[in-house]
Amino acid sequence: MKRLFTPVRLALFAFLIFGIAAYLFVAPSDDFIFLPDRARPLAPLVAVEGEKNTEDQGGIYFVTVDVRRATRLEELFPGVQEGSTLVPEHQVQPPGVSEDVRRRGELRDMRRSQQIAAAVAFRELGLRVSVERRGALVGQVLPSHPATGKLRRGDVLVAADGRPVRSPSDLRRLIGRHDPGDSVRLRIRRGSQTREVVLRTVASPEQPRRAIIGVIVEEVADIDLPRSVRINLGDVGGPSAGLAFALDLLEELGRDVDNGYRVAATGELTLDGGVHPVGGLKQKTIGARRSDVDVFLVPAGENAEEARRHAGDLRIVPVRSFQQALRELATLPAPS
């Protein structure tokens, strides 16, 4: 009787299985995967003119998300790693945009967030900051909205219906004058060229009576700081560390912001001190929890709700503004 599994056949079968497993383990998929990363202290990475040495056990920490191409194995089993989220390519990298262009945009966002954070922190200390607002920068175009295909990341909106747009709030106010379904005439600056685009508005999913065009916009301004600031986070990009930067700058300049706690913070900061929502709260919360920080400041609303789902014993503090963040930290009980 013939043996079904000879040693040679078993060896070939094992080699085949090993080859498939190795391919799945290293071959990239079309999707991206978001993973938690540890919270890191900002103090060693921030240099500001006039900084003071502090001795307390606290500190301000920033949190990031590890974003990379998923392997084929991770695509098949996305829940293998705690806190992982599989994200379709188009949500991370819009069609027609190379990975290099996307990364350069994220690094520009980081540099801008550092400037805005420094402006907010210096103003809190009573220092004069010169700001010239230059429009509303398109940070993201939402899919299947009026702006899709008409506007792109990096466009600067400088006028709406013939009225100047100097900030994101100007844009929201001018579009908000319309009813959903009305058309709005926008003037945009794209590189060195200026053009006009007419878009028909749609209703906001959250507020059906409010007209929107489907963009997420950011501050764009020329900022003249009274003191030199250097923040070196290497290749970390995006605007979401703005709140952490501003808090740490106050610490560096002698203000006891952390109240003796290890404080992680995330949130995009605006020039008027507002704290706006950011992405990756699941991963950032898990990363903060694993890093043994005491408090995690997050934007109020959906970001805070997401953070609480993954916080465990980590204290979550929702905030809507930089001033509120300072008040919340100042009223924490003394660390035991």
Image: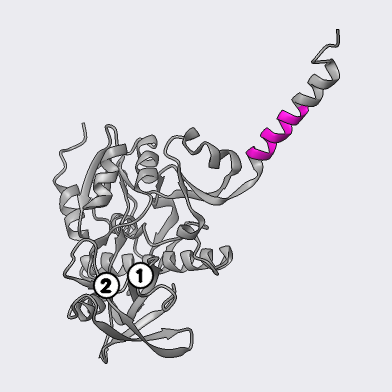
Q: Position of residue 266 (x, y in %)?
A: 32, 53
Q: Any mark on residue 35, and which?
A: none
Q: Residue at x 80, y 15 (%)?
A: 4
Check the image and tell me how it is coloured. Answer: one colour
Q: Residues within 10 Å of mark 2 (few under 14, many from 20)?
A: many
Q: Residue at x 20, y 58 (%)?
A: 320
Q: Is residue 118 above or below residue 180?
A: above
Report which residue position mark 1 lands on: 145
Which element type, helix, strand or loop, lies under badge 2? Answer: strand
Residue for badge 2 = 202
Q: Are marks 1 and 2 in contact (CB under 8 Å)?
A: yes
In this view, the residue in front, 217 or 74, is: 74
Can residue 262 be seen in the rendering of this structure? Answer: no
The reply, left or right, for residue 217 in relation to residue 323 is right
Q: Is residue 269 above or below residue 261?
A: below
In percent of width and height, residue 211 lies at: 22, 73
Give the amino acid type for the residue marked by disc 2 in the picture: Val
Drawn side of residue 288 relative to residue 68, left or right = left
Q: Nearer the viewer, residue 154 or 61?
A: 154
- Establish if 28 lies above or below 150: above
